Amino acid sequence: MSLRSRLLCLVLLATLLPASLLGWRFLKENEAEIADAVSNLALSSNNVAAALDQRVQGTAQLHYGLAHSQLLDSADRVLCSAHLSAVRETYPQYTGIVTVLPDGQLHCDSLQSGRVVNLSDRNYVKRVLAGATGVSTEPAFGRLTGTAVLQVVYPARADDGALRYMLVASLNLQSFAEDARRQSLLEAAELLLLDDKGTVLASVGGKEVLHTPGASMAGSPLFALAQSGGMGEIIGVDGLRHVWAVADSPAMRAAGLRVLLGQPHQVLVASSRRHLREGLVVLIGAALLLFAGVWSLAEWGIRRPVVRITSMVRNLGAGDLNARIAPPYPRGELGGLMSALDSMANSLGRQRSAISELTEHLREAHSREISERETNEKQLTRLANFDGLTGLPNRTLFRDRLQQAIRRSRRSSKRLALMFLDIDRFKVINDSLGHEVGDQLLVAISDVLADCLRDSDSIARSGQAAAADEVFRLGGDEFMILTEGVNAGEAAAIARRILHALARPIKVGAHELFVTASIGITLNSDSGVDLDGLIKQADMAMYRSKELGRDTFCFFEEKMNRAATERHALEVQLRQALERGEFQLHYQPKANIRTGQVIGVEALLRWKPAGQALVAPDRFIAILEETGLIVPVGAWVFREACGQMMKWQRAGMRPLQVAVNVSARQFRHPELVQQIAGVLRETGLAPQLLEVELTESMLIDDSEVVSRTMAELGRMGVGIAIDDFGTGQSSLRYLKRFNVDTLKIDRSFVKDTPNDSEDSAIAKAVIALGHGLGMKVVAEGVETQAQLDFLHAHGCDELQGYLLSRPVVAQAFAAWFRLQDVPASPAAN
């Protein structure tokens, strides 16, 4: 863009900016004028409503005065009609004033027509006869005149409340509309009076046929506006926009009238648009004068001196060091610039040789920089795409290679297999032997994986060409194996080869290590599964392998995805279940086998989401444990269970011991003892009436936290029970070391007694073991009398099971307990 063009743009900007601001101000003033016109229209419509209210109020005053005239009680119709006729001449705004007798017959008539009319069908007659008092209004068309009127009705009553007659004054609505339109002083204004059915009662100033008196406007946009109130624009039959304002007043609402005052939009805004045009004409003229003045200054003061400077600089750039700017120089900064350019031209010759020498040095430095940059880029590429420890392709390159393999598989219709391999218990090696040994083991495992691929498989390492089948390290102890053109059998063979190779000892320095791995395999049978979907499937299959006991492989199945989705949904619900109060406790009693007396209960956690059935504990307890939600939920269980025990005691029940299950994660929480102590203080429950149930696997963890927690609970007086004894990794040493009060025989050893000799022998052994260590023995899952007799015969202390009662809510347990709480013998039970 030339300098002249740039200056022109600047001049235009300098001209248009103030012009735009002034134009914006004109537009705002125009909008304000239009708003004032609209407000004036609304004000005028309200004035019409106020005028109608005044006429109704004046009519009411007239009625009050006439009601005190004895002439209207006269039986002489001629005399009273003459009196009303004289009143009407004084108040010409009424088309007529009549009195109606209680039987609906017209009596006095200001028109002196002498007609006999029965008006009992009129609504106002029915209302008065129904007991209405005070002035009421009703729009109607006169039966003789056909003119729309507003009938103002006043029931004149005797001192005892008996109806004497009804005074009815018919206010001429058409005459009122004409007066109101003239008083509004609005140009081309149209005034409409409608009843609540949309019938036009009066119309002034309108040209449309639909607006003539007697016409129905029901269903029209104008009637809809009249019903909703306010203001609106409606396009008339003539195709022009009209602005309408709906008036509102108590008298109109009582009479069912709708008053609308409107103006054509072009008339409403005519004055403001005229003012806007005049302002724009002045603005354009001023802008043109400003543009001419500023452009002259820019041309002579800036552009022409700059052209001289540009010519001299262009010659210098072409190598003409003799180029100069001929004087005279203009005053100001541009003149100083011309003088400085002449001085600069004198020194350019001396600098040329120095520049040539410097250019040579820069050329050499640039060559060295390019060489170093290429080397660094290669190193960065290697670091970005390959694992620094094993040299295997990393996660970034894996995603790229997998995406390419998916495309090839879709084009060729050949399947690919993706294997997710995770080293089992690798953390143990890191923690026990150190991270350096762990790193060396990962390098050795990567070599094993390379050897395990079939003959056509290869492993892509830095500095080597990538083959179709590759091994990748995602990070930590996780590897991915990508094979193409294989079926399920071939993929399984590769997985077996890997597991077999890893089963051999691996030499790492002075250590001989044995490792296993869990492998998840997925095949891209579904072309709709994308890259992340395949990785997710392989990951779920790998975790399924770990659930199956590790050192194995597992193929992905769709039910894994459904199970993961269902588990995620449960986890989302569980995170808010405690706040929503969806957890509840069920209580299952424990009884003394010898006496049959109930001596305690076990508090069992149940979950009932809002609007759903109870969720089985085996579906949500594990999720609470994994997410850590078991800690706050467990604290709630302690508070709820202990609080319920005290409620029962205050209700007159004898004290019972309550057993609460504690998970491994909850038991290792450093604040568990403080939580239990706080609950006991808060509820007032004696510590001896609380028993904590643990699984025997918790005792195997011979950690300082477990030992300290067991000791502190024992000092507090809280009982400790081993739940499901015999199903875990039992150790008599731990039973002896820790202060355990109760052993609970697992239901799996009780359900087949006394018929199964092995279960019977285990049950007897556990009873003998518990008694030998000074512990109380409780049998779980007792469901038959034969089981109870067997346990009683072999000295078991307590029973718990369906034979006694199923787990029930607190209210049901209390009712059951009151029926059962009597001394009894085992035979009685």
Image (tube, helix red, strand yellow):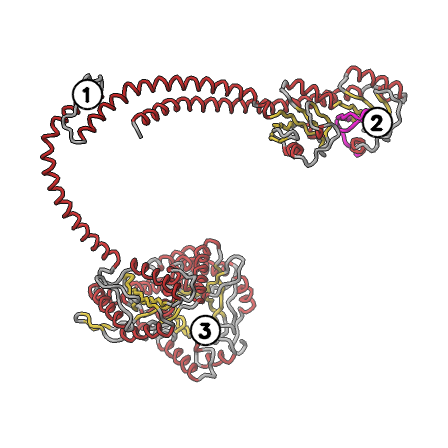
Mark 1, Cα crowd under 10 Å, few <14 / some 14-19 / many 20+, is: few
Task: Kindly report the distance in space between the C-alpha atoms of the residues bearing marks 1 and 2.
Answer: 107 Å
Q: Nearer the viewer, mark 3 or mark 2?
A: 2
Mark 3 or mark 2: whose residue is earlier in sequence:
2
Magenta range is 130-153
The answer to whether the residues at label 1 and label 3 have Cβ atoms under 8 Å apart is no
The residue indicated by pointer 1 is 336
Mark 3, Cα crowd under 10 Å, few <14 / some 14-19 / many 20+, is: many
Residue 452, position in %: x, y? 27, 72
Residue 257, position in %: x, y? 70, 29
**In the rendered view, does 471 fall on the left or right side of 595?**
left
Element assignment for label 1: helix
The residue indicated by pointer 2 is 100
Mark 1 or mark 2: whose residue is earlier in sequence:
2
Task: Say which amino acid is labelled 1.
Answer: Gly
Element assignment for label 3: strand
In which image quadrant can residue 539 be found?
Answer: bottom left
Mark 1 or mark 3: whose residue is earlier in sequence:
1
Residue 724, position in %: x, y? 41, 72
Vertical position of residue 699 compared to residue 38: above or below: below
Task: Say which amino acid is labelled 3.
Answer: Glu
**In the rendered view, does 573 fall on the left or right side of 502?**
right
